[in-house]
Amino acid sequence: MNERPEQELFEGVAEIKAIDAAFVEKDWFVTQVISSLFEFK
């Protein structure tokens, strides 16, 4: 699993995409889980 980015990065992406930062952060965590599952297999 990658090191968690700073909160400011999530907020910056959220501002660009015009969505809540929580969605960006959630997507990052989901991507990390999927990546870990893929490596586990």
Image: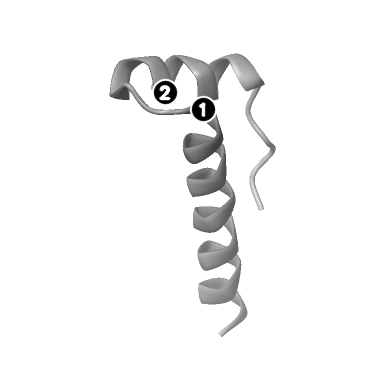
Q: For mark 1, give the secondary structure.
A: helix
Is 16 placed left or right of 24 in the picture?
A: left
Disc 1 residue type (three-letter): Ala
Q: For mark 2, give the secondary structure.
A: helix
Q: Residue furthest left?
A: 17
Earlier sequence position, callout 2 versus callout 1: 2
Placement of 40 over or under 27, stated as above or below: below
What residue is drawn where x is 45% and y is 14%? 12
What residue is drawn where x is 56% and y is 35%? 22
- Quadrant into which the C terminus falls: bottom right
Q: Residue furthest bottom?
A: 41
Dot 2 crowding, Cα within 10 Å, few <14, some 14–19, many 20+: some
The residue beneath circle 2 is 14
**C-alpha gap between disc 2 and disc 1:** 5 Å
Residue 32 in the image, given as x and y percentages of width and height = 57, 55
Is 31 placed left or right of 6 in the picture?
A: left
Foreground residue, 19 or 25? 19
Dividing the picture into quadrants, the one containing residue 7 is top right
Foreground residue, 26 or 5? 26
Placement of 17 over or under 15, stated as above or below: below
Is 20 placed left or right of 41 in the picture?
A: left
What residue is drawn where x is 63% and y is 28%? 5
Dot 1 crowding, Cα within 10 Å, few <14, some 14–19, many 20+: some
Residue 21 in the image, given as x and y percentages of width and height = 51, 27
The residue beneath circle 1 is 21
Dividing the picture into quadrants, the one containing residue 13 is top left
Placement of 41 over or under 29, stated as above or below: below
What residue is drawn where x is 51% and y is 66%? 34
Disc 2 residue type (three-letter): Ala
Q: Which mark is residue 29?
A: none
